Image (tube, rainbow, N blue to C red):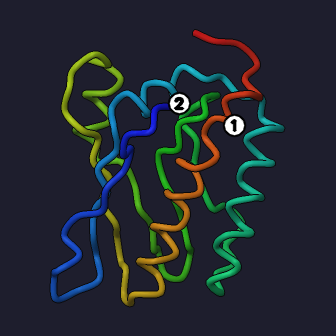
Amino acid sequence: MSNKIIWQPFALYQPCFDFGILLSRDFCREMLETKLSREIQRKTNNLCLEVSERFGFNYPEAVTFYEDTAFISQFYLGNNGVWLAIDQSSKHSLLEYPNEKELIKYSSHNVDNSKQAYALMALVDWWAEYADIIKSHSVRAV
């Protein structure tokens, strides 16, 4: 993984606590091209659960992977549907036009306080920080 910034929060200035994340398209493409076994996906989810539990959230599924890849399409906290998910237009663009240049956008839903916002950002940060380790467990490349 390159040393450049691969994710950036935006819209943190709103009067509510919902926000968005912009991800590097290159990072997203790398994660889509990394195929993982269900066991490695389960272990990754469990590590993400540990991150969310540090913030006081205990939802059984912290992340949703896109099919059998290392690409996470949604981060969950539970608590009345609190999540951060890829926007459908970004998902379509990434899957249909992977070599385009625009950033990939995620938007939050039902974020009611700064603790929830920070926990979701921590999950994204964990994914970005440990991407190389996750990729090292690839079962095969596309």
- State the residue at coordinates (71%, 37%): 133
- Residue type at tag 2: Met
Q: CA distance from mark 1 to mark 2?
A: 9 Å
For this rendering, which residue is in front, 59 or 129? Answer: 129
Measured from the top left, where is residue 72 in percent x and y?
A: 53, 44
User: Is residue 24 shown left or right of residue 15?
Assistant: right
First of labels 1, 2 by sequence position: 2
112 shown above or below 94: below
Residue 134 image offset from top left, x and y in percent? 69, 37
Q: Which residue is mark 1?
A: 134
Query: Would you identify the image quadrant in which residue 138 lies?
Result: top right
- Classify 10 Å Cα crowding around label 2: few (below 14), some (14-19), many (20 and above): many
Residue 45 rendering spot, x and y as whole percentages: 71, 54
In the image, residue 17 above or below residue 24: below
Q: Nearer the viewer, residue 38 or 43?
A: 43
- Is the C terminus in the top left, top right, bottom left or bottom right quadrant? top right
User: Residue 114: horizontal and vertical position, in percent?
Assistant: 39, 87
Secondary element at tag 1: helix
Q: What residue would you read off at disc 2?
A: 31
Residue sitting at 60 percent across and 29 percent down? 69
Q: Is residue 127 left or right of residue 27?
A: right
Residue at x 38%, y 27% (from the top left corner): 26
- Tell which residue pokes out farthest to the top in this image: 142
Residue type beneath disc 1: Ile
Give yes or no for contact between labels 1 and 2 (Cβ–Cβ under 8 Å): yes
Left or right: residue 49 compared with residue 27: right
